Amino acid sequence: MEGMSSADRLTSLTEAFDRAGGSGSKVLIRRVWLGDVPTHLVRRQRAVYDSYSGAAVTFGDDQTIASREPAEVVARLCELIAATRTDALNLRVHLPGMPPEAIREQIETLGTEVVGPLRDNWPAP
């Protein structure tokens, strides 16, 4: 499931999938960021997405999960997993125009401070 939709929208999709007898993975995409999210880059990327949909459709509020505290990122991801009944995550940190060093730092920090606690606290289906 793409990372631009709200939890309510994604929950309706996963519920429909389950009712239809879907048996594959329900993978949720979310942009995550530890620290101050580079909002100018997020806005630039959202403008690209909006250009795909035309003027009549908007993706709504930004769904990036960002915090200076790893525990908050874990808690928000766990809430989202439980609400949407997803069973896998695709976490994104890259934004066009972001220096490779910043991306590497995010990957390393998320790997050491978020992934383990997220795995340990993954909501039961």
Image (cartoon, grey):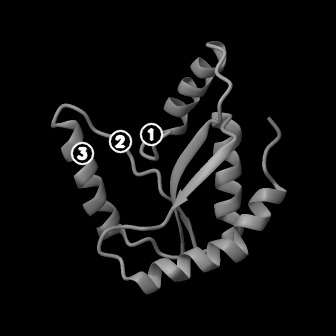
Say what secondary structure mark 1 lies in.
Answer: loop
Q: Residue furthest top?
A: 20
- Give the residue drawn at x 28%, y 48%: 49
In this figure, which residue is indicated by the disc labeled 3? Answer: 50
Q: Position of residue 28 (x, y in %)?
A: 57, 44
Q: Can see residue 79?
A: yes
Q: Cβ–Cβ below 8 Å for labels 2 and 1?
A: yes
Say what secondary structure mark 2 lies in.
Answer: loop
- Give the residue drawn at x 65%, y 53%: 77
In this figure, which residue is indicated by the disc labeled 2? Answer: 60
User: Looking at the image, which is closer to me, 102 or 6?
Assistant: 102
Rendered position, 29 above or below 120: above
Mark with earlier residue (3, 1): 1
Q: Cβ–Cβ below 8 Å for labels 3 and 1?
A: no
Q: Is residue 74 left or right of residue 61?
A: right
- Give the residue drawn at x 62%, y 36%: 26
User: Looking at the image, which is closer to me, 1 or 4?
Assistant: 1
* Disc marking residue 5: 1
